[in-house]
Amino acid sequence: MHDRSSAEHQLWLRSFHQPTPGAPRLLCLPHAGGSASFYFPVSKALSPAVDVLAVQYPGRQDRRQESPAGSIQELAEGVFRALVDREDTPLALFGHSMGAMVGFELARLLEAAGRPPAVLFVSGRRGPSIQRTETVHKGDDERLIAEVTKLDGTDAALLQDEEVLRMILPALRADYRAVETYQRTPGPRLSCPFVVMTGDADPRVTPDEARTWAEETDGAFELQVYPGAHFYLVAQQQAVLARIEATIRRLGSTSGAVA
């Protein structure tokens, strides 16, 4: 069992810098089409005081030979298995866009197992109570590329490279399918605190839609609105990381309360 858990950990989770022993952990979950390396700057900025782990979804980079996951719940379950036997240190979750949905479902699994996260950071995504018909994943490659370009999360030069496109499009389409077919299953509200972050000009979610995440927790709730669009967190990196670090720093002394 231990060997299996260790293998799952190495498959799903990436660590870029050596943390201080006993440091609180921050698990970062990428957006649609994203990979663990997106969070290298986060690890560089917060280490060694925070043990930053980044999730590597199947179907990309060094997991390119694997089939992409078919649903948000499948992604969450994969990450959960990788965490099952990890040491009992404070665990914060940060997910952007699709990663916010995976983080939410992962938090539900952790709470059901009696190991609630210390805090869930939700970024760039409306709450799951808001259902919207979206069909980008059903369109042709041009429509998918146009959608990604509009959100400005991928280097435009990469989208002009045919070889790169052939490598990333299958996982990207699978991610969009997982996002667009996601439905929240019935279950209890979470108990962990939520810190919700969004850009004030995000074409995919308004601040009011981001605020609906408050419906999903009985814990403390905070909404932070930053200047910028869907990938506001790149331009606002310093402010976002300061908020994350300040929140995590309080975890041990305030029983997870968010101030």
Image: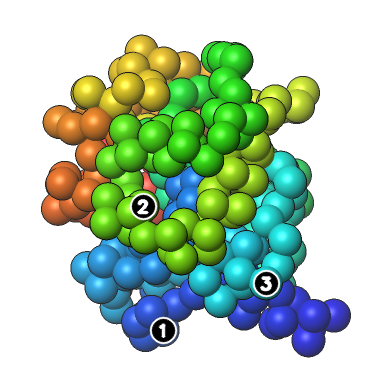
Circles 3 and 2, Cβ within 8 Å, touching? The answer is no
Secondary structure type for disc 1: loop
Residue furthest toward the front? 162
Circle 1 sits on which residue? Answer: 21
Q: Earlier in the sequence, mark 3 or mark 2?
A: 3
Q: Earlier in the sequence, mark 1 or mark 3?
A: 1
Q: Relative to 88, does residue 68 appear above or below in the rendering?
A: above
Q: Relative to 10, does residue 102 appear above or below in the rendering?
A: above
| Number of numbered discs on residues | 3
Secondary structure type for disc 2: helix
Residue 147 spot, x, y in % from top left: 41, 33
Q: Residue at x 15, y 46 (%)?
A: 235
For the residue pair 86 and 128, the one nearer the viewer reads as: 128
Circle 2 sits on which residue? Answer: 159
Q: Which mark is residue 191?
A: none
Structural crowding at the residue carrying mark 1, measured as other residues with C-alpha within 10 Å and reported as few (<14), some (14–19) or many (≥20): few
**Residue 34 position by quadrant:** bottom left
Three-letter amino acid code at disc 2? Leu
Residue 102 seen anywhere in this rendered image of the structure: no
Three-letter amino acid code at disc 3? Gln
Cα distance, mark 1 to mark 2?
Answer: 41 Å
Residue 189 spot, x, y in % from top left: 64, 27
Q: Residue at x 46, y 37 (%)?
A: 142
Using residue 233 as the reference point, say whether residue 86 is left or right of it: right
For the residue pair 18 and 144, the one nearer the viewer reads as: 144
Circle 3 sits on which residue? Answer: 65
For the residue pair 165 and 249, the one nearer the viewer reads as: 165
Secondary structure type for disc 3: loop
Residue 223 spot, x, y in % from top left: 32, 27
Q: Residue at x 22, y 49 (%)?
A: 234
